Amino acid sequence: MSETEPPKPLLSVRGVRKTYALGRRAIEVLQGIDLDIEAGAFLALRGASGAGKSTLLHLLGGLDSPTAGTVEFDGQNLSRLSARRLARFRNSRVGFVFQAYHLLPELDAVENVCLPARLARAPAAAAAGRARELLERVGLGHRLDHRPRELSGGEQQRVAIARALINDPVLLLADEPTGNLDSHTGEEIIGLLRRLHAESGMTLLIATHDLHVATCAPKAIDLVDGRIAPDAVA
């Protein structure tokens, strides 16, 4: 009986470094990252502030490019994509949830959630219907026409999560999604992300400095001073 090849990872990171210029100084934020992430995985990326968590998430999602090394998504080197194709990739395959909710203050919840779909040229009525469905799914069916200033922090983050899901991403990247929330609301948001992951089978990566949040993921990766710590995947 012939052996079958193991499935290829959704994300494959090899030798990734990221350096920023600060005046005459070069700040190396990531110092050689090797990492594979399987499709459908749920991982926590742990690390203190300044460890490089946000930088790594930005590289994985195509928001930034490495100074050296490669980030492959489903076998495709993101650095080889043109700006237009990279923007299309982010819009169609990746959802982002940030610590700061990044909602547009002049738009209501439905309109904020619709934005990625409208950028993908989805018909307005279809996008609005999908946005309402997602807002119901995250527990905000009673807040559809509320603007961000009329919503609590937890409600704003739920709107942001719905927005991240509207184009059915393969990968959801959440960068300190509970950082601006109290502990009770933070647990609700993590519980919501866990449920959405279980329902959809998408790949979910949460970056956090909160060890309690990290324990909610089946596996965790420790990032220390721009490097993955030895024996860091647990």
Image (cartoon, rainbow, N blue to C red):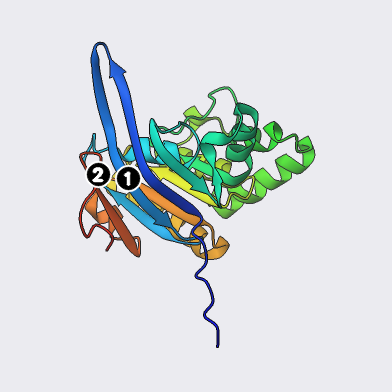
Q: Nearer the viewer, residue 218 or 162?
A: 218
Amino acid carrying label 2: it is Arg
- Distance in Å between CA atoms under marks 2 and 1: 6 Å
Quadrant of the rendered image containing residue 214: bottom left
Using the image as rendered, state which of residue 11 and residue 49 is in the foreground.
Answer: 11
Residue 103 disc label: none
Q: What residue is at 41 percent from the left and 33 percent from the top?
A: 66
Task: Say whether marks 2 and 1 touch (CB < 8 Å).
Answer: yes
Q: Which residue is mark 1?
A: 33
- Quadrant location of residue 57? top left
The amino acid sitting under disc 1 is: Ile
Crowding near the residue tagged with mark 2, few <14, some 14–19, many ≥20 C-alpha atoms within 10 Å: many
Mark 1 falls on what kind of element? Answer: strand
Q: Residue at x 38, y 34 (%)?
A: 68
Bin the neighbour count of mark 1 within 10 Å (Cα to Cα): few under 14, some 14-19, many 20 and up: some
Residue 206 location in percent, x, y?
38, 49
Tell me which numbered mark, 2 or 1, is placed earlier along the sequence: 1
- Let me know if residue 141 appears in the view: no
- Residue at 34% in and 54% down: 44
Res. 125 image quadrant: top right
Of the 4 image quadrants, the one containing the C terminus is bottom left
Secondary structure category for the residue under label 2: strand
**Residue at x 24% of width, y 44% of height:** 227
Residue 84 place in picture, x, y as percent: 64, 29
Residue closest to the eye, 216 or 47: 47
Which residue is identified by label 2? 227
